[in-house]
Image: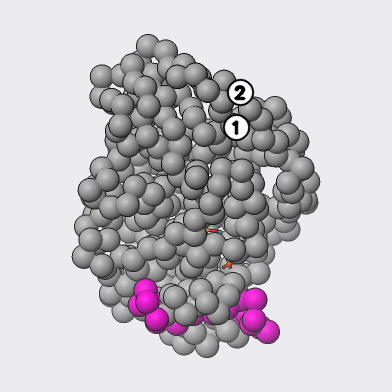
Amino acid sequence: MAGTNRQWILESRPTGEPTMDNFDLRESEIPEPDHGEVLVESRYLSVDPYMRGRMRDAESYAEPWDVGDVMQAGVVGDVVESNHPEFEEGDVATGNLRWAEYAVADGDDLQPVDPDLAPVSTALGVLGMPGRTAYFGTLEVAEPEPGDTVLVSGAAGAVGSVVGQISKLAGARVVGIAGADEKIDWLTEELGFDAGINYKEADNLYAAVGEACPDGVDAYFDNVGGEITDAAFAHLNVRARVAVCGQISLYNATERPMGPRKLAGLIETRARVEGLLVRDWAGRFGEATEQLAEWVQTGDVQYRETVTEGFENMPEAFLGLFDGVNIGKQLVEVE
Ligand code: NDP
């Protein structure tokens, strides 16, 4: 297919918080799919906190991008050309593609998206990677029991909002921490969270967590790290579980954070602190999607998306993650 493609390039590596100067929008030809490949026209693209790690020239769980390369992103799009037996023109597909309007991928690396199941954008959110992270992180690591208090940081984001709802379904009392009153209202008035803490308004986070969790914390699902997590650790109960999913408050740090400082308390509580990577459950993704789709259909799990219009606004949408602009999953819709 002849025509012009637009792609976002990693122009330079950020120091501290990324800026618009780190990104460059370039035009190129629309690529041709080879044997076994599929050409996808992006409809929705995902921006995710982990991408900050890929902008760094350092080993992390995701490979660093090279300066000058097109950045990668989860994409939902329309198949416009296919040389793969499982896809045909007009299908909707998702995969880890590029910050691009058009991209080719090996058909084996794409998954079909069923538009009758839910709006196709959910394949990047509640029915996609963030939803699966919440599903496995909650059920396999945080392990909420009826009557437990579950504390969730980053609670109004893509992962955190689903963690809280799954914990409610497991019979726990759920407290969410987020950075705006509007977010706390959404959690407590619509999603069924029992209490919420706006950490930006709290004078004393330790006291705020204590007040919201009078019986202590049996499971802490950590999306943010830093001082919020220090406060959470101080309220862990005996045999508490801590699921370390993300540390967004530290992603832009220019120096390695000091710590860990809160381990002494683990002696007394015998709490378990466990990191998680969603890809470890790759063999069970189907189970998670099926269950999450059922919960979405029954209304047991609700979701929200913050959709930035226009492919040219991808960096802005990404930078907004660090300012808490998004409620629920942050997406970009190609107009
Ligand atoms: P979110 O949708 O939660 O978006 C990020 C949110 O983080 C913002 O909305 C903001 O909300 C909050 N935030 C930003 N800066 C800070 C800060 N300094 N202190 C506290 N909160 C902050 O993102 P996701 O749901 O996609 O991801 C959540 C976390 O999970 C991330 O840390 C991510 O890296 C991690 N993750 C890990 C995976 C794994 O396999 N381990 C897989 C997927 C995600 P607010 O207004 O509340 O500040």
Q: Is residue 129 above or below residue 155?
A: above
Look at label 1 and name its amino acid: Gln
Q: Nearer the viewer, residue 226 or 266?
A: 226
CB contact under 8 Å: marks 1 and 2: yes
Residue lying furthest top in this view?
35
Say whether disc 1 or disc 2 marks the residue closer to the N-terminus.
Answer: 1
Which residue is at 42% across, 13% downward?
A: 34
Label 1: how many Cα within 10 Å (few below 14, some 14–19, many 20+): many
Q: Is residue 305 above or below residue 255?
A: below
Q: Which residue is mark 1?
A: 7
Amino acid marked by disc 2: Ser
What's the residue at 43%, 69% (across, down)?
Answer: 219
Q: Is residue 285 left or right of residue 5?
A: left
Q: Which mark is residue 28?
A: 2
Q: Quadrant of ligand 1?
A: bottom right
Q: Secondary structure at mark 2?
A: strand
Task: Tell me, yes or no, if residue 175 can be seen here.
Answer: no
- Left or right side of 267 for 133: left
Residues drawn in magenta: 189-206
Residue 255 part of the magenta-drawn span: no
- Residue for point 41% across, 47% down: 124
